[in-house]
Image (cartoon, rainbow, N blue to C red):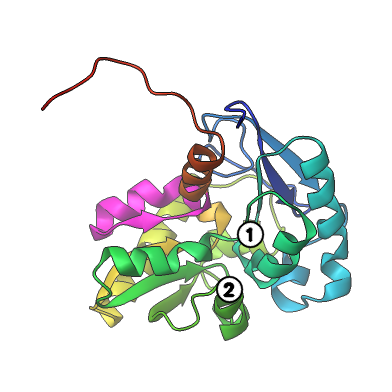
Amino acid sequence: MADPTAPIGILCLDTAFAKPPGHIRCANSLPFPTMKAVVQGTTIAELLDRPSDAFFAPFLEAARDLERKGCAAITGSCGFMALYQNELSQAVSVPVFASSLIQIQLMHQMAGGRGKVGVITAKRRALTDRHFAAVGVGDTPVAIAGMQDQPEFSDVILNDKRTEIDENRLTTELVAVGDSLMRQNQDVRSIVLECTDLAPYAHHLQRALGVPVADLTSLAKMVHAIVARRPFAGQVSYD
């Protein structure tokens, strides 16, 4: 029987910047337990710009360790882990959702298969067809925009210049990138945030753009509801 208190395991890069509520690595973000495995010495730059089997090998062992410790499912802390969805899912027997990009096909179908799914990523040139193909969404129409030219995002997330985030500035940057994406692609009907660090500001983006917005934190809630079912309570209804 599924254990409703079982944690979701999170494979984490070795980063020091702040993770506000809404971030998958923040303890206050999810209504169930999580268990983090930080792979020492791994960086965002290496995953985005120099991904390799040798780089990712420690994550596979970390995933096995999370499974041994009782995690009901395993995810990553960066959407670029999409590249290793198959390797991770083969390494363990529990469900794996390596990246928020898995949701692209769901978002497209929710719109009746019409238009495009907007993808906002940490670094536009680093997100390739290989990432989409690795999570089975290579044929889904997307429009992509990157945060790499936004000063606050770039300084804190990509370049490690500071550990503290000016959340108001980052929100403004995200909304500007989303607005530009939709003005240039008027058939975009939803947004998927590749970058885990953008999830805390998804509600601001949705308010500004008026479309459904998915991220890794929202996906984790759905996955936990699937793998750790709870009994229903209340009165029978005949309505």
Residue 168 in view (yes/no): no
The quadrant of the rendering that contains the N terminus is top right
Q: Residue at 36%, 56% (x, y): give it.
A: 213
Which sits earlier in the primary sequence, circle 1 or circle 2?
A: 1
For label 1, count other residues whose C-alpha is less than 10 Å away and answer few (under 14), some (14-19) or many (20+). Answer: many
Does 206 appear in magenta?
A: yes
Left/right placement of residue 53 relative to residue 78 reads right
Q: Residue furthest left?
A: 239
Of the numbered discs in the image, which one, if any, rests on residue 232?
Answer: none
81 drawn magenta: no
The residue at which mark 2 appears reads as 123
Relative placement, left or right, of 112 versus 9 is left
Residue shown at the point (71%, 38%) measured from the top left: 71
Name above or below for residue 22 compared with residue 216. above
Residue 150: x and y, percent?
51, 67
Q: Position of residue 16 (x, y in %)?
A: 74, 47
> Is residue 112 visible from the viewing direction of this image?
yes
Task: Judge by depth and name the residue closer to the eye, 68 or 27.
Answer: 68
Calculate the distance from the C-alpha at mark 1 to the C-alpha at mark 2.
18 Å
Q: Residue at x 43, y 63 (%)?
A: 192
Q: Nearer the viewer, mark 1 or mark 2?
A: 1
Image quarter of residue 129: bottom right
Q: Tell me the SS state at disc 1.
A: loop
State the extent of the magenta-drawn residues as a range: 199-216
Residue 98 image label: 1
* Residue type, numbered disc 2: Lys
Residue 124 vs 26, above or below: the answer is below
Amino acid type, residue under disc 1 in the picture = Ala
Question: What is the x, y in percent for residue 109?
Answer: 31, 68
Tell me the quadrant of the picture where the C terminus can be found: top left
